[in-house]
Amino acid sequence: MVGCDLDFDNKNYELAQATATNVAGTQEPIYGPSAIQSVAKQAETTPYTEVQPDHLKWLAMESTCVETQTFYLMADSGHIGMAQAIYSNVAGIRTTCQFNTKIFYPPSNPKPPLWSTDTLDNPDFSPDHLSFYADACAVTPNETVTAYTVKSATNPASIVNLTVSRTAPGFQAGANGTTHFGTDPHNPWGSMRHVFWPRCRVEGSIITKDDGAIDFQGRGVFIHALQGMKPHHAAAKWTFADFQGPTFSAVMMQFTTPPSYGSTVVTVGGIVREGEIVCAGAAGNTAVLMDAKEDPETEWPEPGAAKFSWSGKTKGGQSVSAELVTGLSQRLDRVDVMANVPGFVKTLVGGVVGTKPYIYQYSPPQIPQLKLKIGDNDEHVEEGILFCEATFIS
């Protein structure tokens, strides 16, 4: 009985420590890899689950979290863009919502990226929590939840009117797409979840002051993500890849935890084509950044190349393997995260020595190739567009 009481007290002490660091912004103790329950464990028995409407509901937690719906856009014109709604909360003390847009211009029109970010007034959700609203902003699905309309007039520099329609099934890794954090698996104190629509048709435009309406007809990716804890407590670095080809789309999201959780690597990825998931899950996927050189301005190891590998099985049990190797010699942008968020949001990662988040963004001008093999004889080499990010936090 004494041993049980001690174990109970230790768990409560650890939970109290985690809660305190979520509020104060301090570094976490070293819990070790046993304090993370990776979604890869779920994926051993259930590689992935096809996305249903309920999976896309905003949770809008009343505790510390950052929840996002992000639409990555690859226009036929060569423009690359992003539209993003963000809900963030610190310890239930205060909530803020943002709407962000970004436009990268094609090589034929070399100019700096257009970035707009605005705090939203009067944010709210529909009763079913599938739609997000605020003054001059709405992110809403259609009745069948197979397409989203994204509209925003919150910033005159980029007025958004887009429709993003799923053309292949969406997926989440494992049974629920979630990695949990905490020493008691039955009472976790944090979480990380991603839901993907990897292949979408994009229609509509973003109206800018200088260039007028930019037509974003093309392809895209939609990702609903939830970090149910402070972002810098969940991940020390991220790597993201979005490949869109004429036939196939491939997506990968990898994060590495801080040492407090054993520097554990979690990699979720999938490959789809029109109307079909080829493979998806959290096992056998890798993202490797190569040829790194220290960026003298940030002291982060900026990658010069990357290798993304996918592995899995089709629904019919055929083995699937794919690889994409590319140079990253020319970045699209380097984002100083702390310089681009409101003061309140900075409290989510503020106060920790060594926390200086930067995002390196790339779309290689040399056309990348996805090399894919399905079963013994079905091989494909497909050229397409790649957008990728390397994020360093701590």
Image (cartoon, rainbow, N blue to C red):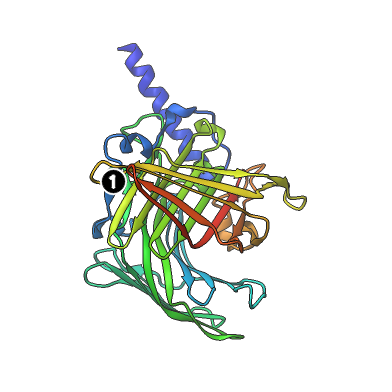
Quick one: 276 or 132, which is closer to the camera? Answer: 276
Residue 351 in picture, x, y percent from top left: 62, 46
Quick one: 190 or 324, which is closer to the camera? Answer: 324
Quick one: 2 or 244, which is closer to the camera? Answer: 244
Q: Residue at x 30, y 59 (%)?
A: 57
Q: Residue at x 33, y 48 (%)?
A: 279
Work out which quarter of the rendered image holds the N terminus and state it.
Answer: top left
Residue 91 in picture, x, y percent from top left: 45, 49
**Residue position for label 1:** 314
Disc 1 crowd, CA 10 A, few/some/many (<14, 14-19, 20+)? some
Q: Is residue 146 above or below residue 186?
A: below
Q: Is residue 145 above or below residue 187?
A: below
Confirm whether residue 120 shows in the render.
yes
Confirm whether residue 61 shows in the render.
no
Left or right of residue 394: residue 70: left
Residue 73 in picture, x, y percent from top left: 47, 69
Q: Residue at x 42, y 23 (%)?
A: 10
Q: Secondary structure at mark 1?
A: loop
Residue type, label 1: Thr
Q: Residue 258's image quarter? A: top right
Q: Residue at x 45, y 40 (%)?
A: 266
Q: Is residue 142 above or below residue 253?
A: below
Q: Residue furthest right?
A: 296
Q: Residue 85's image quarter? A: bottom left
Work out which quarter of the rendered image holds the C terminus and state it.
Answer: top right
Left or right of residue 351: residue 380: left
Q: Residue furthest front?
A: 377
Q: How many marks?
A: 1
Q: Residue 318's image quarter? A: top left
Left or right of residue 112: residue 162: left
